[in-house]
Structure formats: C-alpha cells, structure tokens
Amino acid sequence: MSSSSSLSVNGTENKENQQFDPHSMTNGFTEANCSCCDHHENSLHSHSISQSPQNENNIEEEQELISRLQHFTLDTINENCDQDIYFHSYKSEEQMLSIMKLISGVLSEPYSIYTYRYFIHNWPELCFLCSKKSENSNNPSSTQDDNENELIGSIVCKLDLHKKILRRGYIAMLAVNNEYRRKKIASKLVCMAIQTMMERGCDEIVLEAEVTNQAALNLYENLGFLREKRLYRYYLNGVDAYRLKLWLK
C-alpha cells in the first residue's frame, strides 16, 4: 500500500466511557488527533488557550457553520475529486481491515483492533469512507464493490455525553492516502461527520492534533475549530498536542 498523507489526526476520547482496558493494548492508546483524554491531562501539563464563546446569536452561528460545511462539500465534489472517487458510510465488519490498514499507515502511534471496534461498532454512523473505484466496479454503492475498491480516506468519530451534560462529538481518527492529497478529501470527510453530529443534537466537537501538523490545524481552523489548550508531551513520541474545539450551541 502506498504511503499516506501527513494530513492525519488521531486520538482517543475520555477513557471513563470506554468499555475496555486501554492498558491491555500492546502499543498504548494515544495519537495525533486525540480529543478529550481527561486522564492524559491529569498526568501532563496543559495550557489553556481559549474559552468557550458566549451563547449569543447561536442560530446565526449555526447557519454560518452549515453554510461553511456546504461550501466545503460542494467544493470537494465539483472541483477537487476525480470522477472515480466517491464517499460512503461504513457498512460492515468486512471493511474493518481496510480501515485499519489505511489509518495505521498514517498515524504516528498504532491502535489495536479493539480500539477500532470500540469506536466503529458503537458509532458506525459516524464512520465515513472515501474510495477509489476499481476498473471492474459497476455499482460503487454496493458493499461488495466497496470492499473491492481501494480505500483512500477514512474518518472515525464518536458522540456521547460529556460530564452528563453536553453531547460531545469526538474525531478520533482521520487519514487520507498520500497519493490523493490536495483533493479536499479530508475536508469532505470532516464535513460529513460534523453534519451528522449536528443532526444528532451535538453541542460541541473536540479533537487533538500534533502542534507540528500544520495541514490538519489549517483544515480544522478553516471549519471554525479553535485551539482550546496545549497539552505538553501528549504523544508517546514526545510531541505536544493542541486540543481543538468547535462549539455548535
């Protein structure tokens, strides 16, 4: 498989809600786009950067966000993607190995299959994929053709209650094959995830990205994410992370 894009972010949400023991995994459970690891904050120094905006003009802000998402979506479909590239939702366990292969080639820290299953099995509606149609593919909407086609992009997310109050979305993993960069595939995948979370009443969305991953930071900040705080030596490789947040309400 060809090398993948450096435009990648990955991470893992607050462990208090997880149903497995992260310490049982071989290679740890943190990564370059990790988003609400409260346990990680307790063990590492962090520096707050921004505060939550006031709850004024929420309707106008939401409409502005929807307009921004639509712009990114139309831009991606009409101008930047080949006709053989298409976006689709996760459908079955048969796609799991392709997702793992793609993401493991991009993210700086590996995940076990239990991590993928935790997110994708619990929130399959928040896993979106981008594939390149094979020459023999006749119906890209079918699961069979999805499995035969080349997976070139993936986003994995979750949505649950945070501190029993907020419906918080979390972008756990985002990866795009290096050969298909600069086609706004990552932007389209993020927009699909945000729109789905909004439809489900999400209050805010968070993630973590390496401070050195400027491409990922630009992508999210163009969509309205703000740098909430800096987490020092957040990753196993010693790199700091920015926690980014998008307020929806």
Image (tube, rainbow, N blue to C red):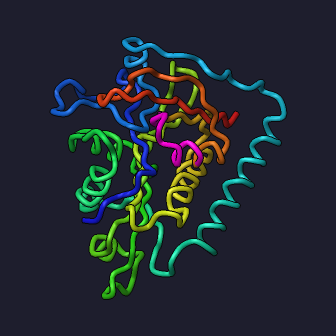
Q: Quadrant of the C terminus?
A: top right
Percent across and percent down for residue 13 are 41, 30
Q: Position of residue 154 (x, y in %)?
A: 40, 56
Left or right: residue 138 versus residue 181 is left
Q: Position of residue 88 (x, y in %)?
A: 45, 65
Comparing 203 with 8, the one in front is 8
The answer to if 216 sits in the magenta stretch is yes
Q: Is residue 184 left or right of residue 224?
A: left
Residue under the image location 39 percent in, 29 percent down: 239
34 or 210, nearer to the observer: 210
Vertical placement of 60 versus 245: above or below? below
Image quarter (top left, top right, bottom left or bottom right) of the N terminus? bottom left
Tell me where residue 100 appears, x and y as whole percent.
Answer: 26, 52
The structure residue drawn at horizontal position 56% and vertical position 23%, both measured from the top left corner, is 229
Residue appearing at x 60%, y 30% in the figure? 227
Query: For the point 49% across and 16% down, which residue is it?
Result: 46
* For residue 226, side relative to residue 36 (left or right): right
Magenta stretch bounds: 208-218
In this view, the residue in front, 14 or 231, is 231
Q: Is residue 64 above or below residue 29?
A: below
Relative height, residue 212 to residue 1 (above, below): above
Task: Inspect the magenta stretch and tell me whether residue 38 lies in it.
Answer: no
